[in-house]
Amino acid sequence: MKEDIHMLEYGDATMEVRSAMVPCKLKLSDAGIAFRNVRTGKVETLAPDDIEVVNWQRLAGSYGIRIFTSNGILHRFGGFKDSEQPRLEKFFKSTLKKTLKDKEYCMKGWNYGAAKFDGSVLSFDVGNLPAFEIPLNHVSGCTTGKNEVTLEFHQPDEVPTNLMEMRFHIPASEIAGEDPVEVFQQRVMEKASVLTATGETLCIFQEVHCLTPRGRYDIKCYPTFVQLHGKSFNFNLPIESILRLFLLPHMDGRHHFFVVSLDPPIKQGQTRYPYLIMMFSGEEEDEIELELSSEELKEKFDGRLEKEMTGPQFELISRVFKGICSRKIVTPGSFLGHSGNPCVSCSYKAAAGYLYPLERGFIYCYKPPIHIRFEEVTAVNFARSGSTTRTFDFEVEVKNSGMHTFSSIEKGEYNRLFDFVKSKNIRIKNRGKMEGGSGRGRDDYRDSDADEPDHYMNRVKADAAEYGDDGDDDDESTDEDFAPGEEGSDVAEEFDSDAPDSSDDSDASAGSGGSDSKKKKDKPKKAKTVSEKPRKRRTNKKEKDENRPKRPMSGYFLWLNANRENIKTQYPGISITDLSKRAGEQWRSLDDKSEWDAKAVEAKKDYEEAMKEYIASGGGGDTGGGLGSKKQKRLSVVSSSPSKAGSGGGFKSKEYIESEGSSDEDDSNKRKKSKKESPKKKKKSKSNDEEEKGDEEEKEKGDEEEKGDEEEEEEEKEEEKMSEGSDNDASD
């Protein structure tokens, strides 16, 4: 806070805007009270004569001042501490001759009381103290019922929770006369911020091409608001909601953008449009006549509008908006890009557009439209765009909303954009890298590719130094030859004729005491060296013959060589591509080209004569040493290792081979016979099964007979024992 006898400044204050407290900068001086919305940049002032009542009141979480003006408008400012009250009271008393009084509110919490209207403020009093106050310019609608009135409020976008509506119950009056509900509604609607399409229109612009919101609209201008009439939607724009006007030329030089900054934005469902963007063609001429007389125009608009106006359509609509809204039209300043336009072609979040450096900020058009004021910018940064060096990114850091990155800007725009930012005293983050140290300045960015190390080339050089000098060293990496016939190979299979036999090896090792295995181990293995030196590139270019005549130029190129300097003087700083475009347009517009066609015919004749002399002198032969003259045939040599006859387990004698072949034939014959006999065996097996079943049945019958015989024998034995016992008793 900066304190002076006749001035007080608060940079972290808040102000009430549509039922929401938003940050602002407040300045109190003998000239009045000035406050600026930090979010939108809108500046408003209150003259000392307009201030009627000043109060000190308690707000949510802090203290604030309440200023009531002579036209009935209420302003609230918060963010003050309790210790600021004596200083503010002294300032208002000594400088503005006003007394800062404490505003007391009722804390009973009753929901019944009296509604009082004071200017554009509705006060709900409980007893003799107000319970709350409602600025009626925050009201967007008012509906009535039988004994009820409903107030609807504007919805600010930046507040997560806000007041939607409020209902008042008004009891019926016993006194005959006016209805109190209708009287209440009329008093509210007189000061409410409700737009109705009434009154006489000043002028109408039909079928205007709008980019946001997209479509074609009829623009109807009224003294207090502007209406957009489309096929599907209609929008009403109050004059107070228009903050700024921008008139921007298109990069093609034929169209113009007219941008209208709005707060609050246009609402279409859940979509918000903070900018109204119209695009006009420079060739469209229009003429309008305002409905008001010249005297009425002077009284209402202070001579800013004329009754009859003619000119391009974009110029007329900008003049009408300027006269109605009393706002200045912002146009591009002194900045000129590499192509001679006051804008820079770039992209923002994969959408192509144009960035316009203005005298007090940047504006990006058009999707999405972005306006950045210099006072919001903390720093800018010039960054490289990906892996390419033909374009760069322009990053703008903002205090509240983070960073905006404008990418894919041509490299030729760097110097001009850098000089512009530097002239506005904006901090550049990578300025030390651009200008410091080596003294090269901004050329560090221009020649950045030449200074970068080539990692691939460094690696190739290191490999060449490592393998080129130590080619015969023992530590060099080697690869073993692929030899499936050798004993140590893991690839030889058991069915190969050269596969080692484990039994033979074991017998040989047992008989010779392992001498053969030692000899095999002592044999050196073959090694194959691999050269890893970088290969030389082949050149296919042929040597150019300097004595060969050059081909003749056409009439267009003869004309271009003669008029190239004239085009450069007409368009200073023009690029090569733009120069060729301009030259092509001028060549097509020529009516008489016979002069240059005749020169082209003469040049062709001279070329033919020179070629005849050149061929006669022996020219025209192949002098190049390309691949055609240096063809080389590659010979692939396949080396076969000698067979190891008579050694190892893989050797077989002739007799063994013959006996093995005969045994194989016998085995095959036996297999064939067994296949033929197999069905007969199956039949025999079936008959045998039937016989076995019959035998089993006979056996079972025989077993039963034997059991019966055994039982009879046992009975006879028991009878004999009984008879013997009876004989003994009789003898006794």
Image (cartoon, rainbow, N blue to C red):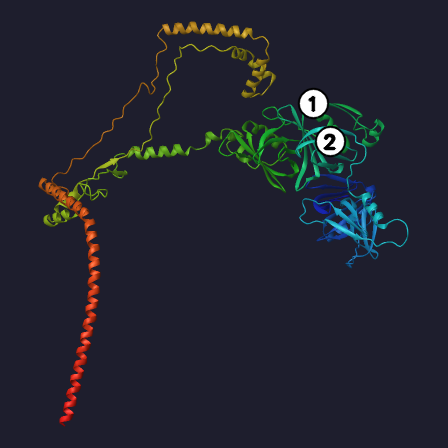
Kindly identify the residue that appears in the image at 81 percent across and 30 percent down.
Answer: 302
Kindly identify the residue that appears in the image at 39 percent across and 7 percent down.
Answer: 614
Q: Quadrant of the C terminus?
A: bottom left
Residue 632: quadrant of the picture: top left
Calculate the distance from the C-alpha at mark 2 to the C-alpha at mark 1: 16 Å
**Residue 440 seen in the current view:** no
Residue wearing tag 2: 219
How far across and down, in percent of the image, does residue 467 sit? 30, 34
Q: 209 or 637: which is nearer to us?
A: 209
Residue 652: quadrant of the picture: top left
Numbered disc 1: secondary structure: loop
How far across and down, in percent of the image, does residue 448 sit? 49, 31
Q: 630 or 41: which is nearer to us?
A: 630
Q: Are marks 2 and 1 in contact (CB under 8 Å)?
A: no
Q: Earlier in the sequence, mark 2 or mark 1?
A: 2
How far across and down, in percent of the image, does residue 400 sit? 63, 42
Q: 312 or 387: which is nearer to us?
A: 312
Q: As drawn, which residue projects farthest toward the bottom?
A: 732
Amino acid identity at mark 1: Glu
Kindly identify the residue that appears in the image at 38 percent across and 20 percent down.
Answer: 541
Where 414 falls versus 43 (above or below)?
A: above
Q: 651 left or right of 127? A: left
How far across and down, in percent of the image, does residue 454 sit? 42, 32
Q: 175 left or right of 384? A: right
The disc placed on residue 599 is none
Q: As drawn, which residue projects farthest toward the right?
A: 176
Q: 393 left or right of 278? A: left
Amino acid identity at mark 2: Ile
Mark 1, other Cα within 10 Å: few <14 / some 14–19 / many ≥20: few
Residue wearing tag 1: 284
Numbered disc 2: secondary structure: strand
**Residue 587 seen in the current view:** yes
